């Protein structure tokens, strides 16, 4: 049973790393996408208080507001903030589960079938909570780094088999 717990500890570790990579990726993407809207609003504030003719200000306002609206709608459509929240939450939950597994392994007399089933069910629920999956580039990075030394989650284990068959 201890070996099974160590496998799930590896899987939690790998998933936590994947979630952290994705959180950082979507955080950077969100910052890159949102920076023009912030700058656009600041520029509009300055322009609206300037002495530029109203016709010119009107066209600048329409253009910048249109761009801001487009950026915000794309951000909403791609659910960047939802992805950020999901990956950050999953990272924290995988870390918690890892600590629980480590504690159980360190107290090996406490390992029971019921506890093992509880950990497996908790892990499965976390897997189901990921609505967005993982990008192939990060999966491949993890496989190259840990594929031979850690137990991989099923999605990555299947990918290792496909890669090694090719």
Image (cartoon, rainbow, N blue to C red):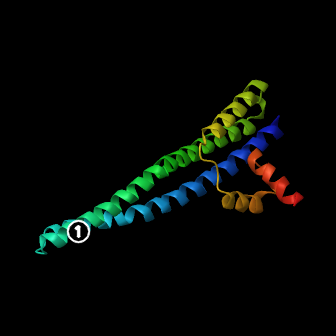
Residue 63 in the image: state x and y as whole percent: 29, 66
Q: Is residue 111 above or below residue 33?
A: above
Q: Which residue is mark 1?
A: 59
Picture quarter with the C terminus: bottom right
Residue 113 at least partly seen: yes
Q: Classify mark 1: helix, strand or loop.
A: helix
Q: Residue 142's quadrant in the figure?
A: bottom right
Q: Residue 111's quadrant in the figure?
A: top right
Q: Residue at x 81, y 38 (%)?
A: 4
Marks counted in the figure total 1
Q: Residue furthest right?
A: 165
Q: Residue furthest left?
A: 51
Give 3 or 156, whichever is nearer the viewer.
156
Q: Residue at x 72, y 33 (%)?
A: 120
Residue 122 in the image: state x and y as whole percent: 66, 33
Q: Is residue 71 left or right of residue 83?
A: left
Q: Residue furthest top?
A: 114
Q: Residue at x 55, y 60 (%)?
A: 25
Residue 19 in the image: state x and y as whole percent: 60, 51
Picture quarter with the N terminus: top right
Q: Is residue 42 left or right of residue 71?
A: left
């Amino acid at each position: 049973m201890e070996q099974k717990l160590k496998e799930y500890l590896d899987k939690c570790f790998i998933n936590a790393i994947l979630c952290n990579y994705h959180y950082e990726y979507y955080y950077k993407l969100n910052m890159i996408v949102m920076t023009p809207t912030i700058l656009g609003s600041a520029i509009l504030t300055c322009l609206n208080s300037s002495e530029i003719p109203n016709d010119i200000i009107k066209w600048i306002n329409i253009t910048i507001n249109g761009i801001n609206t487009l950026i915000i709608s794309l951000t909403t459509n791609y659910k960047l903030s939802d992805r950020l929240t999901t990956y950050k939450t999953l990272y924290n939950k995988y870390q918690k589960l890892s600590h629980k597994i480590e504690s159980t392994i360190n107290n090996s007399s406490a390992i029971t079938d019921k506890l093992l089933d509880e950990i497996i069910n908790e892990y499965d629920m976390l897997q189901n909570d990921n609505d967005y999956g993982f990008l192939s580039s990060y999966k491949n990075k993890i496989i190259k780094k840990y594929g031979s030394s850690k137990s991989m989650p099923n999605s990555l284990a299947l990918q290792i088999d496909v890669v090694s068959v090719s």
